């Protein structure tokens, strides 16, 4: 094949594809993770018999007050073309005596411009039965149509707690983890049930009809409030100079990361801002090594928020004399802790939070170091060049290799393969002892051992039984 004749066309094609990919990737800078533009809100409404109780100064039935306020709100949302509504009611078709714990119905499904139908269905409600909140929430999961580009929100309106059993909190948490809907709003009508319902969503107690109107309106406004956050990563001088670290906004309830951004500072040193969904409570995780976690960050809805987190960092570099590659690995732990936070390669500059760390090199034998990482400084760990030792044990058998310390004590290094008679190890310089017994001997008295010294760069032959 004449490669020269096709080189121009191939190069042109490659260049075009490369430019296309570059342009696409460059353009993606401004279309990162965003809050979906459209929203679906499902009203999960209490139609149980207890809604016939009187409420407020006017001494009206709860159901009549709730109907009036909810229909006003629904009517006011008709002009919002980025919103779809649905209505599910529970406890309104079966009498209380029937104890029907499956009395929940999607009365109006999601679709554009269904506001008048929702208002009609609300006005038709005649409270009767029990309060199957958990089962209703389970069924509500089926009410949201499939498809991306929407935020799914549940607003639960109730005057009582669960009367049919089930774990409302676990159900809500599981459905949120599956991405069925965001954290529900739960508005209690004259109901103090924070301990019972707060774990299922954001619980709000409306003691009066006016409070109910205010809180319902606020819940809907929150869904459409543009809320932005800037994260300042502070150095040891409390200045926001740290950057280029992944920052995760984690749903506090579900533990699932909602947004991930690699931190950025512009030419003036200011961090960029990111838009987050105000419906969710967040834990902020700065993915340094080890990570820094700030629980339940305070975000003001509808405003720009600045969050400042100290993350002073320094570097560790592990080097071995004469070694240019990164094939040597070392285990990194925080001092006095057992969890491994990193496996670092040789000749790699790696950043850690300031503090003390324990380093264990995966050499033969292993070496341990304690280092104190200081802000904007590099701690260098140097290892001497290894040597090579070849062992001849005549035949296969059982044995181990030990390092002999300066005080004469010995430290186990490794066991030997009992299927081999010859071994080769790359080891750090030092004094060692091999202890070995050939497989077919008739007692431990036939154990052989030999002590030897190994220097950097040396290749040594050790005959155990010579």
Image: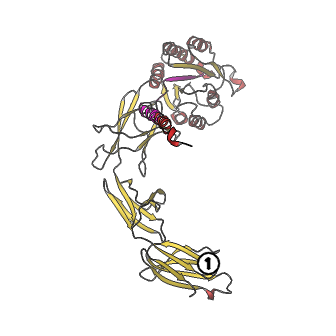
On the image, the x and y values in percent for residue 69 come to 51, 16
Q: Residue at x 49, y 39 (%)?
A: 7
* Quadrant where the C terminus is found in the figure: bottom right
Between residues 220 and 19, which one lies in front from this camera angle?
Answer: 19
On the image, the x and y values in percent for residue 62 come to 55, 18
When asked about the image quadrant of residue 169, the answer is top right
Would you name the residue on which mark 1 appears? 421
Between residues 300 and 57, which one lies in front from this camera angle?
Answer: 300
On the image, the x and y values in percent for residue 403 come to 48, 77
Relative to residue 108, is residue 14 depicted above or below?
Answer: below
Q: How many marks?
A: 1
Between residues 148 and 292, which one lies in front from this camera angle?
Answer: 148
Q: Report whether 218 appears left or right of 372.
A: right
Q: Residue at x 51, y 80 (%)?
A: 461
* Quadrant where the N terminus is found in the figure: top right
SS at mark 1 in the image: loop
Q: Report whether 394 appears left or right of 239.
A: right
Q: Residue 412 in magenta?
A: no
Q: Report whether 332 appears left or right of 243.
A: right
Between residues 454 and 409, which one lies in front from this camera angle?
Answer: 454
Residue 36 visible at all: yes
Relative to residue 298, is residue 449 depicted above or below?
Answer: below
Residue 53 visible at all: no
């Amino acid at each position: 094949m004449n490669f020269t004749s096709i080189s121009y066309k191939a190069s042109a094609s490659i260049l075009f594809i490369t430019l296309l990919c570059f342009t696409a990737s460059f353009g993606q800078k401004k279309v990162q993770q965003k809050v979906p533009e459209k929203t679906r809100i499902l009203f999960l409404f209490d139609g149980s018999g207890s809604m016939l109780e009187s409420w407020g100064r006017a001494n009206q039935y709860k159901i009549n007050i709730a109907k009036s306020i909810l229909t006003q709100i629904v009517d006011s949302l008709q002009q919002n073309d980025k919103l779809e509504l649905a209505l599910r009611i529970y406890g309104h078709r079966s009498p209380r005596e029937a104890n029907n714990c499956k009395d929940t119905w999607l009365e109006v499904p999601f679709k554009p411009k269904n506001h008048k139908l929702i208002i009609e269905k609300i006005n038709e409600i005649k409270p009767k039965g029990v309060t199957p909140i958990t089962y209703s929430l389970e069924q509500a999961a089926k009410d949201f149509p499939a498809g991306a580009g929407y935020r799914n929100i549940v607003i639960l309106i109730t005057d009582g707690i669960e009367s049919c059993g089930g774990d409302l909190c676990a159900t809500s948490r599981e459905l949120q983890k599956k991405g069925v809907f965001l954290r529900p709003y739960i508005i209690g009508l004259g109901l103090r049930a924070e301990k019972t319902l707060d774990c299922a969503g954001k619980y709000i107690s409306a003691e009066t009809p006016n409070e109910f109107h205010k809180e319902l309106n606020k819940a809907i406004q929150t869904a459409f409030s543009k809320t932005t956050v800037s994260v300042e990563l502070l150095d040891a001088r409390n200045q926001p100079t740290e950057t280029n670290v992944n920052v995760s906004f984690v749903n506090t309830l579900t533990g699932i990361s909602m947004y991930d951004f690699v931190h950025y500072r512009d030419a003036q040193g200011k961090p960029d801002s990111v838009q987050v969904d105000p419906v969710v409570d967040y834990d902020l995780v700065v993915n340094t090594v080890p990570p820094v976690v700030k629980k339940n960050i305070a975000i003001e809805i509808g405003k720009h928020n600045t969050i400042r987190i100290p993350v002073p960092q320094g570097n560790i570099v592990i080097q071995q004399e004469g070694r240019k590659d990164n094939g040597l690995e070392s285990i990194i732990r925080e001092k006095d802790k057992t969890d491994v936070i990193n496996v670092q390669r040789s000749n790699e500059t790696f950043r850690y939070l300031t503090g003390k760390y324990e380093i264990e090199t995966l050499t033969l034998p292993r070496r341990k170091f304690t280092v104190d990482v200081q802000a904007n400084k590099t701690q260098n760990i140097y290892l001497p060049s290894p040597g090579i030792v070849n062992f001849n044990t005549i035949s296969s058998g059982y044995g181990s290799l030990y390092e002999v310390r300066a005080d004469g004590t010995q430290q186990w290094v490794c066991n030997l393969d009992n299927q081999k008679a010859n071994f080769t190890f790359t080891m750090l310089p030092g004094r060692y002892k091999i202890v070995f017994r050939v497989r077919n001997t008739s007692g431990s008295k036939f154990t052989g051992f030999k002590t030897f010294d190994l220097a950097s760069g040396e290749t040594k032959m050790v005959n155990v039984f010579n």
